[in-house]
Image: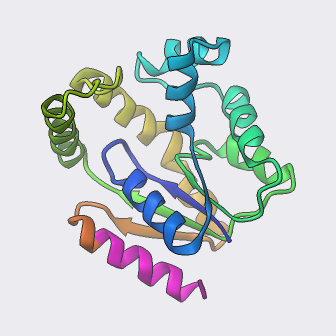
Amino acid sequence: MKIVILGPPGAGKTTVREKVAQKYDLFEVSTGDAFRSEMAQGSEIGKLARSFIDKGHLVPDDVTLGVVGAQLEGKENYVLDGFPRTVPQAEAFLVSGENIDLVLFFDLDFETAYTRLHSRIAETKAAGGKIRSDDKKEIMHKRFVEFQRKTSPMKEFFSKKETLVEINASLDKDGVWQQVQEALFERGF
C-alpha cells in the first residue's frame, strides 16, 4: 500500500499520516519532518532547505527527490506526507519505478488554515516548545500561495491516474478521519 497525502499548510496532513501509518503498519515519510531534522542537524541539505523554507518556498525538486528516495529505500508500504508536491516530482517519482495507490488531497481555505496554525503556535508556546521558522502568518501565506501555484495542478495529474480522492479538510479531525477511512475502504484497504 502506497499512499500520498497532499494539502496546504494547516490541513491536518500530519495527524492523518500518523493515524494511517499506525492503522495499516506503514512506513511514514514527511518531507517537512525530514527537512526540519536536516536543518536542526545543520547539514548542507538542511542549510539549503532552510534558505527556501524560511521564505515560504518549496525546496527544489532534485533535493526533495533525493531526501525521499533515501528514506524509501527498501520500503514496500508507506504513507507520504507532502510528497510529491509538484508534477515534475510526481513524474520523476513514478519514472523511478514507484507507484502510488491512493492520493488524499486535502482541500482547505487560507483563513481556516491560518486559524489552525495560530492554535498550533499557541499550544507549542504553552508547552514551552520551539516555534517552527515557517509558522509566521506572512511565511504561511507565501507557503499557501506556493501550494496553490505548484501543488494544486497535482489534482489533475492524479485524477487522470484515477488515484485521487479529495478530502474536505475544513471539517474537524473526526470528520476528516471519517472521509479518509471511507476512501481507504473504497480502495479495498
- In the picture, measured across the screen, residue 183 lies left or right of residue 139, that is right
Disc count in the image? 0
Q: Position of residue 37 (x, y in %)?
A: 53, 27
Quadrant of residue 42 in the image?
top right
Picture residue at 63% right of the left edge, 14% below the top? 43
Rendered position, 135 above or below 20: above
- In the picture, measured across the screen, residue 47 lies left or right of residue 66, that is left
Query: Does residue 159 belong to the magenta stretch?
Result: no
Picture residue at 26% right of the left edge, 73% below the top? 175
Q: Which residues are magenta?
A: 176-189
Query: Does residue 185 belong to the magenta stretch?
Result: yes
Q: Position of residue 117 (x, y in %)?
A: 22, 39
Q: Position of residue 86 (x, y in %)?
A: 60, 42
Residue 58 visible here? no
Residue 24 visible here? yes
Picture residue at 43% right of the left edge, 79% below the top? 181
Rendered position, 57 above or below 67: above
Characterize the magenta stretch by its predominant secondary structure.
Answer: helix
Q: Quadrant of the N terminus?
A: bottom right
Rendered position, 140 above or below 8: above
